Image (spheres, helix red, strand yellow):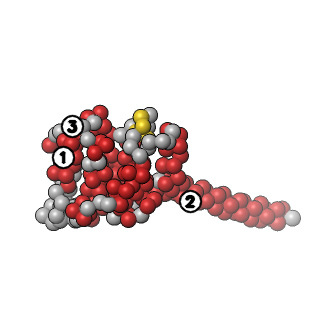
Amino acid sequence: MNTEGPALESLTRRLAECPVDFLAEPRIGKNGVVPVAAVVSDVMLKLGSALTPQQLAVFQQTDAKKYRNWLSAVCIASWLLSDAWFQGKRELANGAYQFLSQTLSEMAAYTNAPKFVTDPDRREELARMCLKDLGLHPANETEAQAQDRLSTLSAAERHRVIRAAQQAEERARAIREAMVRQAAADAAAKAARE
């Protein structure tokens, strides 16, 4: 996140205006409409980098239940990466592939893909996460500001914090129960001595 990227507002507006073609059902096996691997290939070529068949195979899945939401998010993110600001910037290609193939998979675990278009916070999260993976931060923001805002918006971070709080509560409950058992045992031992 050490290089200034495009203005965040232009990216979130682009997401809000995502064409219906990118929102169509991804092709998974013989079902669906959008050939996601072809879309990703086109985006990467516009960045100035061709993907290998092995890299493209990641986007050709057959388990609809497991991959549909992620592949839908990949289509939406491909629309974002097609923005003129990114075109021809070969140095962004590795980060773009990382974003599409891995980061989006994590994000799609917590957010339904259409929300990346319809919900303002999810649009901002997607744009910021994309910029982060590309090694960029939004124009007119410092790296610290960009990271702070991303942490505030991140659904994955929110789930991690909730999970940590639940685990801490579970540990506290177990300790309380152990203390009650110990107090009962101590009381029983004291009564037996008297």
Q: Earlier in the sequence, mark 3 or mark 2?
A: 3
First in sequence: mark 3 or mark 1? Answer: 1
| Residue at which label 3 appears | 48
Question: Residue beneath label 1, please?
Answer: 41
Can residue 94 be seen here? The reply is no
Q: Residues within 10 Å of mark 2 (few under 14, many from 20)?
A: few
Q: Amino acid at mark 1?
A: Ser
Q: Is residue 168 among what the camera can see?
A: yes
Instruction: Name, please, the residue furthest toward the left.
Output: 30
* Mark 2 vs mark 1: in front: 1
Give me the C-alpha separation between circle 3 and circle 1: 11 Å
Decide which of tag 2 and tag 1 comes sooner along the chain. Answer: 1
Which SS class for mark 1?
helix
Three-letter code for the amino acid on which mark 2 is drawn: Gln
User: Which one is in front in this view, the residue at disc 3 or the one at disc 1?
Assistant: 3
**Picture residue at 82% right of the left edge, 62% below the top:** 190
Which residue is more in the foreground, 12 or 112?
Answer: 12
Residue 67 occupies quadrant? bottom left
Q: Residue at x 58, y 57 (%)?
A: 165
Give me the disc on residue 166.
2
Kindly identify the amino acid type of the residue bearing the numbered disc 3: Gly
Between residue 74 and residue 181, name the one nearer to us.
Answer: 74
